[in-house]
Amino acid sequence: MNPQAKLIFALSLTLGTTLTISSNHWIMAWTGLEINTLAILPLISKSHHPRAIEAATKYFLVQAAASALVLFSSMTNAWHTGQWDITQLSHPTSCLILTVALAMKLGLVPFHFWFPEVLQGSSLIVGLLLSTLMKFPPITLLYLTSPSLKPSILMTMAILSAALGGWMGLNQTQTRKILAFSSISHLGWMAIIIAYSPKLALLNFYLYTLMTAAVFLSLNSIKALKLSTLMTTWTKTPSLNAILLLTLLSLAGLPPLTGFLPKWLIIQELTKQEVALAATIIALLSLLGLFFYLRLAYCATITLPPHTTNHMKQWYNNKPTNTMVAVLTTMSLMLLPISPIILAVV
């Protein structure tokens, strides 16, 4: 793909995201979502591999259906209340349809089936965009409409997402699929808290974006698409592999790393809101995610392949690590001590 085309698609993604997150009118928000969808499709299918074409087709169909539901929800609300303002969503049917539409956009259970397949058909950089930037507009819409949405539906979806994201990630061998199920699990944490504390859900999303970007860029720099490749990279970039281990543990939410902060605050807030049972369930379900992060970390740093003769030895790479990877991994590990400042800013 030539640089001019890449620039156009990058600008379109920026425009679509900015349009959705800054608009008050449903039609403008819908337009931004459509621009985003159309801009990411060529990036998914650029390799012309059948799996990439399949991923782009699946992505287009799901996102088109979700966008149609967003439009239908806003029109139903405007029909009954005369309001096109995003924050004035009050009709119960519209609220239900919008919850379904945004769950499809984000990949929340039970509308999650497309996400692992699409991520598997994309490159790691496009996978990073799908897991972070493309989730930002729907999360913003969820944030703006959260007072109108039913907490019980969101909580059910959240617990199911945390459960399925954990269970289905256990036996995966492809790093992109593992990160897709990790994303579904993290979305569960955002969905469970958004009705009670929308700002906390956004903070969770920002920190998740930070840590996921660090993991995706690290995997991209060592070209690890499956666990067997990850096993042989220790000889190639030992320092990056060691940092990747810690970043994965941060994504799992282990203290004293950055990833512990949102989980700690969400459990605290849920307990204050007297839904301690939900907090207990989702905390226990995060142990499933911890297992497959540990598995990734184990493969990356501790093991060697069982039959070394069958694996091509990697050359030691003496190139300096990308500055972006260095900054993101440092932030993924060391933000917990300054959590009071983060909370004051948010």
Image (spheres, rainbow, N blue to C red):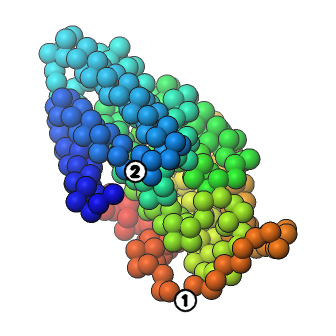
Identify the residue position indicated by label 1 in the image.
318
Cα distance, mark 1 to mark 2?
A: 30 Å
Q: Residue at x 19, y 43 (%)?
A: 19
In-front residue for pair 10/325:
10
Q: Position of residue 135 (x, y in %)?
A: 39, 45
Task: Describe residue 271's horizontal placement relative to residue 91 as left or right.
Answer: right
Q: Which mark is residue 46?
A: 2
The first of marks 1 and 2 along the sequence is 2
Task: Describe residue 68's horizontal placement relative to residue 258 as left or right.
Answer: left
Quarter residue 324 falls in: bottom left
Q: Which mark is residue 41?
A: none
Decide: is 108 above or below 19: above
Q: How many marks?
A: 2
Task: Describe residue 265's horizontal placement relative to residue 35 as left or right.
Answer: right
Front label number (1 vs 2) = 2
The C terminus, quarter of image: bottom left
Q: Residue furthest top?
A: 80
